[in-house]
Each structure stands twice: as C-alpha cells, then as structure tokens.
Image: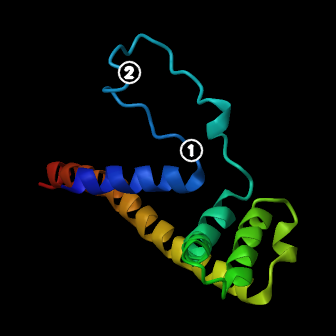
Amino acid sequence: MISENVAEAVAAAQRDCGQPPAPSSISNPDSSLPHQAPPASNVQRPFAPFSRAFQESGALHQQQNQQHRQSSGDNSGGDQASRHANALALANEPGGLAKLSYSELEQLLVNLGRDLETELRNLAIRYRHKRQPLLDAIAEKTAALSP
C-alpha cells in the first residue's frame, strides 16, 4: 500500500511537471533496449503550471456553460465565458499573464497555492520513504556494534 502511494505521488509529480511517466517493465519488458527520448509533444512548456492551474480555475467549465447556454438560446454571461476562454489562451503565452484581469489572476494564484500544497505533501511522502530505510540501516548497525 505504501509503495502504491509513492508510485501515485511520483506519477502525480511527473504529470504536474509535464514529464512523461517513468518507463516500467510492462512498457519495456526487454531491458536491453535503450530508453527512447520522449516525443517532442511531451516537452514541458515553460508556463505549464500556470496553464494547468488556470484550467482548474473553472475557465473550461465556464466555456462549456457558454456552449450549453448558446445551444439553449440563453446568451447571458456569454461575454464572461468568452473572456475566460481568452484568458486561458493568454496564460499559455509568455507575457500573457499581464493581460489577465485582477480576479482571474487571483483565482490563478489560489489554484497555484493548492498545487504547491499538494506538491509539498507528495515531496514529504517521497522523503519519508527514502529516509526510512536509511534510518533502519543505521539502527541495525548501531545495534550490531553495541555490546
């Protein structure tokens, strides 16, 4: 169970950083084959964390609501949804954050804060799992040396 949590934390951290998942024995059963570099589409974008946080802020949900309203004939709030869609596009561009409104930047900051807390929890889990075997080995050596 602990190893599953570590694997999930590592996979989440790799996803958040835009890295491809680590190769496993299932995907490459022949260890004699060299590890291939990820395709160019998996290269991390410099503003990927901003983009992901902004997407989670509800911009995509707003856009879907706008499409639903337009199909039902209600056009109120359409300007706000299109503004969110434009802000999402701007968040991916260098210097695009300067073009976002104050409220959109605040929401982006809140989401980034949540992402940071998640990353810190995952890092603490990975740290504990790497540190514990070292502590156990030190305790064994100390016990073996004690008369």
Q: Which residue is mark 2?
A: 28
Q: Position of residue 19 (x, y in %)?
A: 56, 44
Total numbered badges shown on the rendered structure:
2
Labelled pair 1, 2 in contact (Cβ < 8 Å): no
Q: Position of residue 131 (x, y in %)?
A: 35, 57
Mark 1 or mark 2, earlier in chain = 1
The amino acid sitting under disc 2 is Asn
Residue in the image at 45% along x and 12% along y: 33
The colour style of the image is: rainbow
Distance (Cα) linking label 1 and label 2:
18 Å
Where is residue 85 shown, x and y percent of the image?
70, 69
Residue 134 lies left or right of residue 127; in this view the side is left
Left or right, residue 100 beside residue 104: right
Q: Which circle marks residue 62 in the picture? A: none
Q: Which residue is mark 1?
A: 19
Q: Quadrant of residue 128?
A: bottom left
Which residue occupies the extreme top position in the image?
32
Q: Position of residue 122 (x, y in %)?
A: 42, 64
Q: Residue at x 81, y 78 (%)?
A: 100
Please name whichever residue, 65 or 44, is drawn nearer the observer in this view of the structure. Answer: 65
Identify the image quadrant of the C terminus. Answer: bottom left
Residue at left offset 45%, top offset 37%: 22
